[in-house]
Amino acid sequence: MKHLTAALFLSLTISGPTLADPAASVIGDYTFPNEIVGMPGKLSAFAGLDINSFKTNDGVRLNYWEAGSGDPIVFVPAWGASGAEMINQLWLLAKTNHVYVLDQRNQGTSEKTLKGQRIARYSMDLHEFLDHIGTDKTVLAGWSMGASVIWGYIDLFGTARISKAVFVDEPVSIYTHADWSEEERLNAGGMTTSPERMIAAYRGAPTNQQIVDMKVVHRSQMLDSPYARNALGLAERVGSDPDFTMLVLFDHALNDWRDVIEHKLDIPVAVFSGEQSNNLPSQEWIADTAPDGRLFNYGDGDDGDHFLMLKNPVRFVADLRAFLTE
């Protein structure tokens, strides 16, 4: 790995935001650019939305967003994302549930660190977070890389503390093995034959034939729903440092979770994807392979791509509630 600049090392010594519990106090108030009936007009109007923190056993401060009361739901956001991108889900679900969003290390409001840049460490962070909030049973919901973190958690700790699981459009194996058939690649969702070239492409380098799927990047440039613009505006307020978020991508790309899905998913599972996601065949495979799996497949008119939660939170929450009450 290339040496980080002196400025980046200096940033490690600077503490994160001073937590004052209310989210608007921690990150500053924010007025959402789109006025949406039934949704808050600014962050401070979301009464009871807090940002709290705990320390992991390797000394990293992780923050989490928390709102509502009732049965718990813990969200693990996508690579590079945080509770800010999930502000709409927090608002909608807090009316019926105690909702948490964990800002993973190097993401959102949590601490930047060079330590633990592996999905296994992120899964341990999730385990320690569940210990911290003291929940015996919870719904775990992962979007994109967040689903991989949950698969890693299940691999290490089992499902005793999970009532149901929700996975949103995450490939089972990002890396395409050289000996796979095309059917195996589709079932796993393999999208690259080279993690290094995938990371370079995400940094803006020209794509090449070794990058199997760049549709997720193209769809990320189509986040034009008012819900998505509100969430992404708040995320911009929180900020992100790609020099740190990129650190976990190599390990993330190389994990293959087929054995976990085939042998360890002994709980009800909901899988969300859409017609505009190249991950859809792998999401069908997850839902078909899990003993108690269900697929929610969104069409193009329902913003059915990798960012369906950002673009269409109202339908997503309605479908999630239906799944949870089955």
Image (cartoon, rainbow, N blue to C red):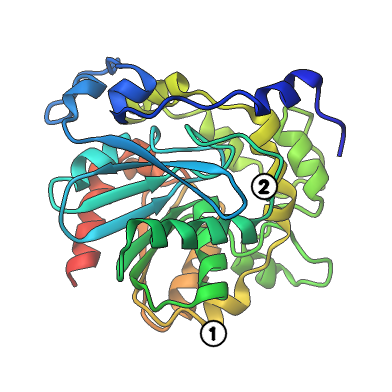
In this view, the residue in front, 54 or 46, is 54
Nearer mark to the viewer, of 1 and 2? 1
Point out which mark residue 213 bears: 2
Label 2 neighbour load within 10 Å: few <14, some 14-19, many 20+: some
Residue 255 placement (x, y as % from top left): 69, 63
Q: Residue at x 52, y 33 (%)?
A: 220
Residue 67 placement (x, y as % from top left): 23, 43
- 74 displayed left or right of 322: right
* Number of numbered tags placed on the structure image: 2
The C terminus - image quarter: bottom left
SS state under label 2 = loop
- 139 displayed left or right of 61: left
Residue 177 placement (x, y as % from top left): 79, 66
Residue 108 visible in the displayed image = yes
Q: Residue at x 68, y 59 (%)?
A: 190
Residue 300 visible in the displayed image = no
Query: Contact (CB < 8 A) between labels 1 and 2?
Result: no
In this view, the residue in front, 35 or 114, is 114
Residue at the spot of label 1: 263
Task: Give me the C-alpha separation between circle 1 and circle 2.
Answer: 28 Å
